[in-house]
Image: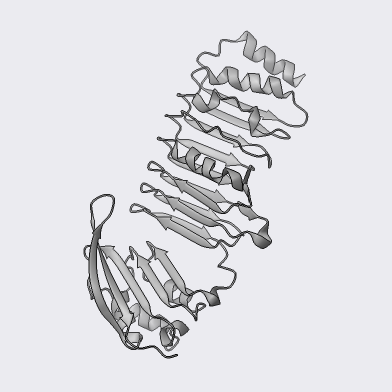
């Protein structure tokens, strides 16, 4: 009955000016008919498409959807089914993409990276309750993205998942990232206009063995010192684009006599980079020099970012180190 009803609606009405189409299929559906419905509406002046389909995979989505030049909003919910976007797409107007309850496998990671980066107008990306099976890398790169939300999405199998998660989005203003799966590396780079960020992710399985830590775009507050407390063997600490948010007194007041253990013995090198106004009076710089024995500034270097802005890097090295 339901399928006949949809057939009649689409056949008996002029849908050439249809702007929004929402389809929910639960239980057994005729794949060919569902495919035909979606293809029909995708050839109209469609602006918003919402698909919530159970027990079917994303192959039910016709190529016409991925070439719908008028499409602005696309939401796909397939209850754990594998998502298979084509290698070639043309969605020049798509601003909002929501992927809900989909599965991805490792051999798709380059395809997904290409898919996200091929959306020139994308502003809002939401990955909700998605599963990444045997993923080694999740890379989201977009020059237009304003808002990214990855919520309740996990990497499987949990016991041997060890992914690298990288987000490169120079226009990103809002970031929400929540997962229960530890990652080997989180890389959040090229976000000069980021205003709000919420990140909830487990720490590396055994941070006590880490010897190298690189942080991007973080504030120099007590949270950094709290993080370093659980990394007693850290030898190399790199701050990329450190943002000054605390005074040296704030840092000293928080830490008291409880300096991170790596400051006493293991730390060998610290690098701090910031835009051109970085100086030796930077609060974190003074704090490190005053609290790590034999730590000295060895060199200052200059570079430019992709926007042509100058970045200054100060390298601090320890003269002597206890064995």
Look at the picture and state if 243 lies above or below 89: below
Residue 108 appears in which quarter of the rendering?
Answer: top right
Q: Where is residue 142 in the image (x, y as percent from the top left)?
A: 41, 43
Q: The N terminus is located in which quarter?
A: top right
Q: Position of residue 263 (x, y in %)?
A: 41, 84
Q: The C terminus is located in which quarter?
A: bottom left
Look at the picture and state if 68 lies above or below 97: above
- Residue 133 placement, left or right of 29: left
Q: Which residue is drawn at 32% across and 80% down?
A: 317
Residue 118 appears in which quarter of the rendering?
Answer: top left
Q: Which residue is drawn at 36% across and 68% down?
A: 239
Look at the picture and state if 233 lies above or below 197: below
Q: Tell me if I can see residue 104 in this picture.
A: yes
Q: Which residue is drawn at 54% across and 21% down?
A: 42
Look at the picture and state if 8 lies above or below 295: above
Circle count: 0
Q: Tell me if I can see residue 260 in this picture.
A: no
- Residue 178 placement, left or right of 212: right
């Amino acid at each position: 009955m339901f399928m006949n009803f949809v057939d009649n609606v689409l056949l008996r009405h002029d849908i050439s000016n249809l702007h929004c189409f929402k389809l929910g299929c639960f239980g057994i559906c005729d794949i060919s008919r569902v495919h035909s419905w979606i293809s029909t509406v995708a050839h109209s002046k469609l602006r918003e498409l919402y698909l919530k389909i159970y027990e079917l995979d994303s192959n039910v989505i016709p190529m016409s959807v991925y070439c719908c030049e008028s499409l602005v909003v696309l939401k796909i919910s397939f209850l754990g089914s594998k998502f298979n976007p084509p290698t070639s797409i043309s969605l020049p107007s798509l601003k909002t993409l929501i992927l809900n309850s989909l599965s991805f496998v490792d051999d798709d990671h380059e395809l997904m990276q290409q898919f996200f980066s091929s959306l020139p107008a994308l502003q809002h990306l939401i990955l909700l309750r998605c599963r990444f099976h045997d993923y080694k890398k999740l890379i989201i790169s977009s020059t237009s993205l304003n808002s990214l939300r990855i919520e309740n999405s996990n990497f499987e199998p949990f016991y041997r998942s060890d992914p690298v998660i990288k987000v490169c989005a120079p226009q990103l203003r809002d970031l929400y990232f929540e997962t229960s799966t530890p990652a080997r590396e989180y890389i959040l780079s090229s976000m000069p206009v980021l205003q709000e960020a919420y990140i909830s992710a487990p720490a590396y399985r055994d941070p006590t063995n880490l010897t190298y830590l690189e942080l991007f775009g973080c504030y120099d507050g007590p949270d950094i010192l709290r993080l370093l407390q659980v990394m007693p063997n850290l030898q190399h600490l790199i701050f990329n684009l450190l943002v000054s948010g605390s005074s040296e007194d704030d840092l000293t007041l928080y830490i008291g006599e409880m300096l991170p253990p790596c400051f006493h013995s293991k730390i060998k090198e610290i690098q701090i980079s910031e835009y051109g106004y970085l100086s030796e009076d930077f609060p974190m710089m003074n704090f490190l020099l005053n609290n790590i024995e034999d730590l000295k500034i060895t060199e200052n270097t200059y570079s430019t970012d992709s926007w042509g802005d100058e970045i200054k890097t100060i390298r601090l090295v320890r003269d002597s180190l206890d064995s």
